Amino acid sequence: MDIKNLLKIILLIIVPWIFIVFLAPLYNRTYPEIGGWPFLWWYLFAWIFIQPILTYIVYKLIDKDSKL
């Protein structure tokens, strides 16, 4: 595995964690509301769909490099 793909994998795993854990004060607010739900709920709900996509990309990067 080359360093470029390793960096991509690390970023795809670490960046969502940073967005959810450390940036909470930025999205932890009541307004704006979408459909009567606070933005916090929509933001976290969106990550339920975003994270598996990122995990799949990491899997494909690792799988591509493991084949000789």
Image: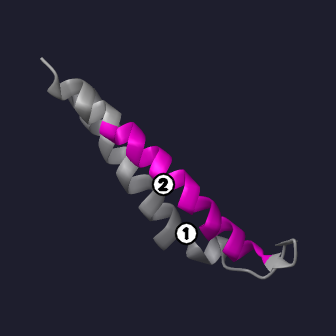
Q: What SS does tag 2 mark?
A: helix
Q: Can residue 22 be seen in this view?
A: no
The stretch of residues the image draws in magenta is 38-59
For the stretch drawn in magenta, what is the main secondary structure? helix
The residue mark sitting in front, 1 or 2, is 2
Residue name at image x 75 percent, y 72 percent: 39
- Look at the picture and state if 1 lies above or below 35: above
- Farthest-out residue, left: 68
The residue that label 1 is drawn on is 23
Residue 23 shows in this picture: yes
Q: Is residue 26 magenta?
A: no
Which residue corresponds to the image point at 57% horizontal and 75% vertical from the top-left? 24
Residue displayed at 45% across by 63% down: 18
Rendered image coloring scheme: one colour
The picture quadrant where one finds residue 45 is bottom right
Query: Looking at the picture, how far across and down is residue 51, in whole percent?
Result: 48, 54
- Pointer 1 or 2: first along the chain: 1
Residue 49 location, quadrant: bottom right
Crowding at mark 1 (Cα within 10 Å: few <14, some 14-19, many 20+) = few
| Image quadrant where residue 5 sits | top left
> The C terminus lies in which quarter of the figure?
top left
Disc 2 marks a residue whose amino acid type is Gln
Q: Indicate which disc residue 51 carries.
A: 2
Residue 13 location, x and y as percent? 36, 52
